[in-house]
Image (cartoon, helix red, strand yellow):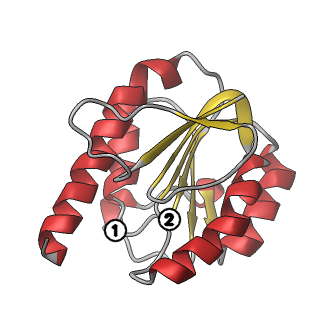
Amino acid sequence: MSRLDSFIARMQAQRDCLNFLKPAIDAVQGPLLEVGLGNGRTYDHLRELFPGRDIYVFERKVAAHPDCIPPDDRLFLGDADTTIPQAVTRLGATAALIHTDLGTGDHAANVEMGKWLGPALDRLAVSGGYVLANQSLDVARWQRQPDPPGVPKDRYFIYRVS
């Protein structure tokens, strides 16, 4: 599969998972977290899916489309290993949804990052909430959920927080 086809498949899976989770997330109180703003497409989609919900964003350096940049009071700017603990202090375990799309093209590096990322994000997740990730994350109180119809196995990972 070409890198372009892989990117398109990942974006389709991401969108399909978010759309699939909408009714479940609507039933859970708390903010939404977007870990990795990128160019802001997913943040924009979250705003459209969940109007009126607080959405907090984590980004190392903002380079998003100008219409897709969150307000300063909803942005944790800097490396995730620094900003996630700041968010824990500020928000606590309140997130109804955590969407993370961090990583590089280096599978081994992504696996290493996932070892600390999952437990770090767990400190922000409310019981009954959801985590949607572009990589497998191993957290004891997260249960992997079935893929939505049409989403290829292991393209995206949905977890329910117990």
Residue 36's disc number: 2
Residues under numbered marks 1 and 2 in contact, where contact means CB atoms less than 8 Å apart: no
Quadrant placement of the N terminus: bottom left
Could you tell me which residue is drawn at 69 percent across and 67 percent down?
115
Task: Give the class, few, some or many, for how many residues have Cα within 10 Å of label 1's Cα (few <14, many ≥20).
Answer: some
Residue depth check, mark 1 versus mark 2: number of the one nearer the observer: 2
Where on the picture, by quarter, is residue 129?
top right
Quadrant placement of the C terminus: top right
Q: Amino acid at mark 2?
A: Gly
Residue 157's disc number: none
Relative side of 3 to 95, left or right: left
Secondary structure beneath label 2: loop
Relative side of 52 to 15, left or right: right
Q: At which x and y percent is residue 17?
A: 35, 38
Residue 48 appears in view:
no
Could you tell me which residue is drawn at 34 percent across and 49 percent down?
44
Could you tell me which residue is drawn at 37 percent across and 35 percent down?
147
Relative side of 60 to 85, left or right: left
Residue 39's disc number: 1
Mark 1 vs mark 2, CA separation in Å: 9 Å
